[in-house]
Image (cartoon, helix red, strand yellow):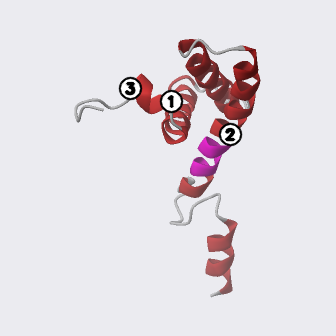
Amino acid sequence: MDGNDLYTFEAIQTLTGAAGATFVVASGIQRAFGFNPRWLALAVAMVISFAVVIHAKGAGSDYFFAIINGFLIYLSAVGANTVVGTDNGTGVQARSGGLESVRQSR
């Protein structure tokens, strides 16, 4: 990958690249258009997974694994989003109940 490239098709063919692309595309759609269904990131992950198989001219069983990989990409992206979370103005990430409970116990 050239240092000037942000994403390439080769990068998206990795789990990290695919999960990152899923996170970026789904978050961008949600922020830009206010479109936020629960299945959006899963749909993006499936499109990426099937695009990789189609690009590689995969056989029948490759499409089965594309479904499994789509869920893996989705869960990886959701996990990254959960770790990053969002700041709700209190300095505590909204999705990290552990930090909230520690703060309340002080």
Q: Which segment did they paint magenta?
A: 75-81
Residue 78 shown in magenta: yes
Secondary structure of the residue carrying numbered label 3: loop
Residue 42 pos. (x, y %): 69, 30
**Depth check: 89 or 27 in front?**
27
Q: Pick the residue in front: 49 or 38.
A: 49
**Which residue is found at the position 68% from the left and 33% from the top?**
69
Q: Left or right: 87 with respect to 4?
A: right
Give residue 101's position: percent from left, percent from top. Answer: 69, 76
Q: Residue at x 67, y 27 (%)?
A: 40
The disc labelled 3 sits on which kind of residue?
A: Thr
Asked if residue 57 is positioned above or below residue 81 in the image, the reply reads above
Mark 2: few, some, or many residues within 10 Å (few <14, many ≥20)? some
**First in residue order: circle 3 vs circle 1:** 3
Give residue 99's quadrant in the image: bottom right
> Mark 1 is on which residue type?
Gln
The answer to which image quadrant residue 44 occupies is top right
Q: Earlier in the sequence, mark 2 or mark 1?
A: 1
Residue indicated by mark 3: 8
Q: Is residue 98 above or below residue 4?
A: below
What residue is disc 2 on?
72
> Magenta part mainly helix, strand or loop?
helix
Q: Are marks 3 and 2 in contact (CB under 8 Å)?
A: no
